[in-house]
Image: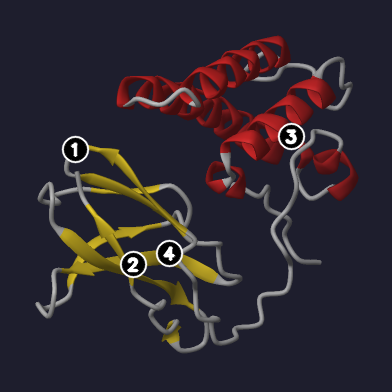
Amino acid sequence: MPTLRVLLGFADLPDTDLSGFGRTVGTKLQNNASYPTPVVAPADVLAKVDEFDAAIAVAAQGGTQLTAAKNAKRSELIEMLRELAAYVQSVAKNDLTVILSSGFTVNKTDRTRRPLSKPVIVNIDNFASTQLMVSMPPLDNARSYEFRTRVGDGDWKTVAITTKARNVILGGFTPGATYDLQGRGVGGSTGYSDWSDPVSHMAT
């Protein structure tokens, strides 16, 4: 029987999806007999989700400080969920029903190695001065992601290798300069996916 692992991909969810996921976990762990001593109180998770929701609404008004405050709440919620994921893993062992009763999901058991599909950059934002935030949909069977940039016809330069595909913050850009960005997945049967089509964006 394959070993079931609690899925940690919630860290890559968009803000509103992460909020909904956190609320589901907090609700399902409340008074759950399978998890009598959670390392983080479900009520604390729900309170953090409320704080995150409020920060999302305020950040929608714009501004780097409000966005930074929202991202801080996001990080706090993700850390809580990671602690709970480890707790659920240790308590549930290999019982799928018990794992799912927590609100968490499990990794796919199909480990067949296949070539990775070509990724697509779906969004680039000016996160802060000299920083860009780039997002691609995650690829099945990718272990990590590599991002690279160039200016004009210059050489490509790798700027990040990360386990995240969404909301990846890249730094070191020159304000006013326009950069081409590409990303690719690492893993699969060939080691790497093709590079995404380049997308241009001006840094601020």
Label 4: which residue?
144
Q: Residue 195 vs residue 25: left or right? A: left
Spatial CA distance of label 4 from label 3 is: 28 Å
The residue that mark 3 highlights is 91
Q: Residue at x 45, y 65 (%)?
A: 121
> Three-letter amino acid code at disc 2?
Glu
Mark 4 or 2: in front is 2
Q: Along the polypeptide, which appears first: circle 1 or circle 3?
A: 3
Q: What amino acid is at disc 4? A: Ser
Q: Residue at x 66, y 75 (%)?
A: 111
The residue located at (87%, 22%) in the rendering is: 32
CB under 8 Å between discs 4 and 2:
yes
Q: Which mark is residue 43?
A: none
Residue at numbered disc 1:
129
Question: Residue 95 appears at what percent x and percent y?
Answer: 84, 47
Taking the image as shown, residue 177 lies to the left or right of residue 189, namely: left
Give the Cα distance between marks 1 and 3: 44 Å
- Mark 3, residues whose alpha carbon is within 10 Å: few (<14), some, or many (≥20)? some
